[in-house]
Image: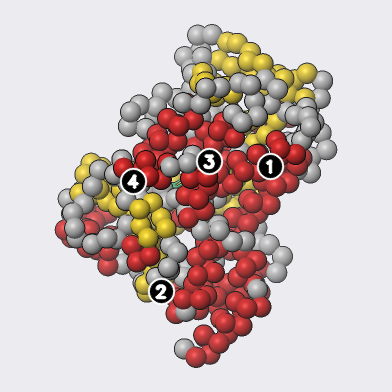
């Protein structure tokens, strides 16, 4: 259920194990890759380094295909991260692709739909069909409500995004509902496209965020990012919380870009805006936990935003969907029957989600308007994270581990290793 990024990834994994994979997706996605049901597709989507690794692992040569289609691949100095307005030391191994979400997803969709045992039905999932203690199918409806049918299935995957109705479907049949954690964020996003020439040389990604020096507030520089994308365009995004949310007025967008770091200022001053500014309001991060439920049916998996949807400023969503697909593959390899509750999958996936949640929630909780929930030991963790973050601006060694964690290549635990702590102390004492 759901044929967007997470559903497509899950279908790719399933195609290795199932006779037939049926994707239920009610949206009509045009050649522009947009459709009407996933409004955030208009926003700039960064693909973290781990996301690119996973994409290539499941879809060999897709990076080259995307590059051939016009998406620039940034390496080393082409990828620039600023913290509190200061450019961080370049990373030797940095590798990020500049592409819009529709372009990236369209390539993924084409690859998945070319698999011989995958097909797509333009249907809306309306509920689950149970047989004893397992899911045996999906009750569906045509998007215009004209017809209903049940699709039998041995394994059902919820990839319906953050507003998935799965919890209500389960409790409606007497099963346990997932434990849901929510963090109110009140985040505003605005994205605009610009014509791209040679104004920034080989720059592919420029990302700027407030950090410890500004108390995580946009006092030293506005939060924003820029990506060189297919079609010789720049895609620029601005982000802000609560009363600081960016609006859709083009002049205000340009004025705010000029309060940002040099690459965004440069583009605002020298490049023509294409089309309108698209805005998005992200009210809250949320994650659902299934691994400890007592009454949960067999034959049911949850992936993507339906499982966890974190603050988008950290660019984790697409990469999480890919990592959860890996968890699905590991589960399918390890299990002898899909009829049992997929506890093994949920344990793995929730461990991956926990790592991403730790990274994003730690920074989110530094925002004065965010009021929790605070994890145990928050103050100490926050203090240590601020030290490491500050050192990462000065020292390439600390920055390398820091960026690996941000890119989901390493677990956040890596930032608490004695080696990183010792180096952080040395760097800060010497500065
Ligand atoms: C403003 C913003 C910016 C973001 N930026 C980034 C970024 O820079 N990098 C990044 O990695 N991530 C980013 N994300 C996160 C990313 O967009 C999500 O993680 C990603 O879309 C999750 O994919 P998904 O397939 O789980 O859900 P979705 O993309 O939301 O798709 C859900 C799908 O389910 C379908 N569906 C819904 N109901 C039903 C039903 N009843 N039956 C069948 N199908 C149904 C929908 O039509 C849709 O196709 C951002 C998110 C936002 C909001």
Give the number of the disc on residue 330. Answer: 1
Q: Judge whether 167 appears above or below 267 on screen.
A: above
Image position of 372 (left or right of 279): right
SS for tag 3? helix
Label 1, label 3: how far apart the Cα atoms are? 14 Å
Image position of 418 (left or right of 387): right
Q: Which residue is painted at 66% across and 62% down in the image?
A: 374
Label 4, label 1: how far apart the Cα atoms are? 30 Å
Question: In terms of depth relative to the viewer, which is nearer, 99 or 353?
Answer: 99
> How packed is label 2: few (under 14 Cα within 10 Å), some, or many (20 or more)?
some
Question: What kind of colouring is applied to the model shown?
Answer: secondary structure
Q: Residue furthest bottom?
A: 430
SS for tag 1? helix
Give the number of the disc on residue 89. Answer: 2
Label 1, label 2: how far apart the Cα atoms are? 36 Å
Question: In terms of depth relative to the viewer, which is nearer, 260 or 57?
Answer: 57
Which residue is label 3 attached to? 58
Q: Is mark 1 within 8 Å of ligand 1?
A: no
SS for tag 2? loop
* Count of residue discs: 4
Q: Earlier in the sequence, mark 1 or mark 2?
A: 2
Q: Which residue is painted at 33% across and 46% down in the image?
A: 67
Q: Disc 1 vs disc 2: Cβ atoms closer than 8 Å?
A: no
């Amino acid at each position: 259920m759901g044929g967007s990024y997470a559903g497509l990834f899950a279908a790719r994994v399933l195609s290795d194990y199932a006779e037939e994979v049926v994707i239920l997706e009610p949206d009509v996605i045009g050649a522009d890759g947009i459709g009407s049901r996933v409004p955030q597709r208009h926003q700039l989507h960064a693909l973290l380094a781990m996301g690119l690794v996973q994409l290539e692992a499941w879809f060999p040569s897709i990076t080259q295909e995307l590059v051939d289609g016009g998406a620039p691949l940034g390496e080393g100095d082409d990828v620039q991260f600023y913290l509190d307005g200061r450019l961080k030391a370049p990373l030797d191994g940095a590798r990020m692709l500049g592409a819009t979400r529709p372009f990236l997803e369209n390539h993924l969709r084409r690859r998945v739909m070319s698999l011989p045992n995958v097909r797509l039905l333009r249907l809306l999932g309306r509920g689950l069909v149970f047989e004893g203690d397992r899911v045996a199918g999906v009750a569906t409806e045509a998007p215009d409500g004209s017809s209903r049918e049940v699709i039998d299935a041995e394994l059902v995957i919820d990839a319906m995004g953050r507003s998935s109705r799965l919890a209500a479907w389960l409790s409606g049949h007497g099963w346990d509902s997932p434990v849901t954690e929510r963090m109110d964020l009140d985040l505003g996003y605005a994205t605009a496209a610009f014509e791209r020439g040679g104004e920034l040389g080989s720059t592919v990604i420029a990302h700027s965020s407030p950090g410890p020096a500004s108390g995580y507030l946009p006092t030293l520089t506005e939060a924003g990012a820029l990506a060189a994308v297919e079609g010789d365009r720049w895609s620029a995004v601005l982000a802000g919380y609560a009363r600081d949310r960016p609006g859709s007025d083009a002049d205000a967008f340009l004025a705010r870009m000029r309060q940002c770091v040099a690459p965004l200022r440069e583009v605002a001053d020298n490049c023509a805006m294409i089309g309108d500014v698209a805005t998005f309001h992200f009210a809250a991060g949320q994650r659902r936990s299934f691994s400890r439920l007592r009454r949960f049916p067999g034959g049911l998996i949850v992936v993507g935003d339906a499982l966890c949807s974190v603050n988008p400023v950290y660019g984790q969503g697409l990469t999480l969907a890919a990592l959860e697909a890996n968890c699905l593959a590991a589960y399918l390899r390890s299990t002898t029957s899909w009829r049992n509750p997929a506890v093994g999958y949920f344990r793995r996936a929730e461990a991956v989600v926990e790592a991403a949640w730790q990274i994003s929630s730690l920074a989110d909780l530094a925002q004065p308007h965010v009021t929790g929930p605070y994890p145990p030991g928050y103050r100490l963790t926050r203090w240590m994270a601020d030290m490491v973050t500050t050192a990462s601006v000065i020292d390439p060694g600390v920055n390398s581990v820091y960026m690996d964690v941000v890119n989901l290549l390493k677990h956040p635990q890596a930032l608490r290793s004695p080696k990183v702590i010792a180096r952080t102390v040395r760097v800060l004492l010497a500065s």
